[in-house]
Image (cartoon, rainbow, N blue to C red):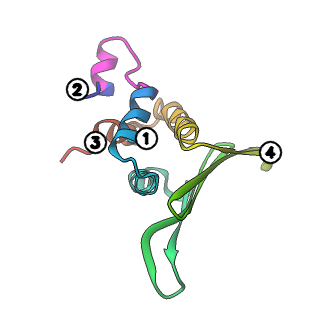
Amino acid sequence: MRPMTMERADAEGGDGFDLDVAISTLASNSSDSRLMLKLLIRQLSEVLGDRIAVEHAGGRFRKSDEIKTGQITLGDDTLRADVEGATVRCSVGHASGGIRIRSEQVGMDAWLTRLLTILHNEASHSEQTRLALENIVIGESS
């Protein structure tokens, strides 16, 4: 069953974005957290611009397309994912007045939930972010 697009849901009276569907879609597309992170960062890079920072694996002279660290800054929140071997360690930091006041380690599901919640809020006033969320949920259209 294909998830409902935002346009169809809006026409039917809902806000069209189901966070649980988005997380389930991401999780079902890849049981490999490293691959899921890589694809997610690729999808969001154009939309988020300088709010996303990626460090690739490899040495000084040999870069890889594998991600070592991904950091996304949205408002006062910083979401960071560090790839360590076969695992991905995620954290969410919160700042106030430019000063980090807390940071907590979270699981990948909690990290994705936080990321998609923030993006969903931003999508209410950004067509580009809304389209990126649709691509995450229903896949890129060719």
Residue underneath mark 1: 129
Q: Write the residue at 43% across / 50% down.
A: 47
Sequence-first disc among 2 and 4: 2
Comparing labels 3 and 2, the label whose residue is closer to the camera: 2
Comparing labels 2 and 4, the label whose residue is closer to the camera: 2
- Cβ atoms at labels 2 and 1 below 8 Å apart: no
Front residue of 67/121: it is: 67
CA gap, disc 2 to disc 4?
Answer: 44 Å
Query: Amino acid type of disc 3?
Result: Gly
CA gap, disc 3 to disc 4?
Answer: 37 Å
The residue sitting at the front extreme is: 86
Give x and y (percent) for residue 132. Answer: 38, 43
Sequence-first disc among 3 and 1: 1
**15 to 64, vertically: above or below:** above
Give x and y (percent) for residue 11. Answer: 29, 15
Residue 20 appears in which quarter of the rendering? top left
CA gap, disc 3 to disc 1?
Answer: 14 Å
- Cβ atoms at labels 2 and 4 below 8 Å apart: no
Asked if the stretch drawn in magenta spans residue 15, the answer is yes
Residue underneath mark 4: 97
The residue stretch that appears in magenta: 7-19
Q: Write the residue at 40% across / 40% down.
A: 27
- The quarter in which the N terminus is drawn is top left
Q: Write the residue at 45% across / 57% down.
A: 34
Sequence-first disc among 3 and 4: 4
Sequence-first disc among 3 and 2: 2
Front residue of 137/109: it is: 109
The residue sitting at the top extreme is: 13
Q: Write the residue at 35% across / 39% down.
A: 28
Query: Amino acid type of disc 2?
Result: Met
Where residue 1 is drawn, which disc sits there? Answer: 2
Residue underneath mark 3: 139
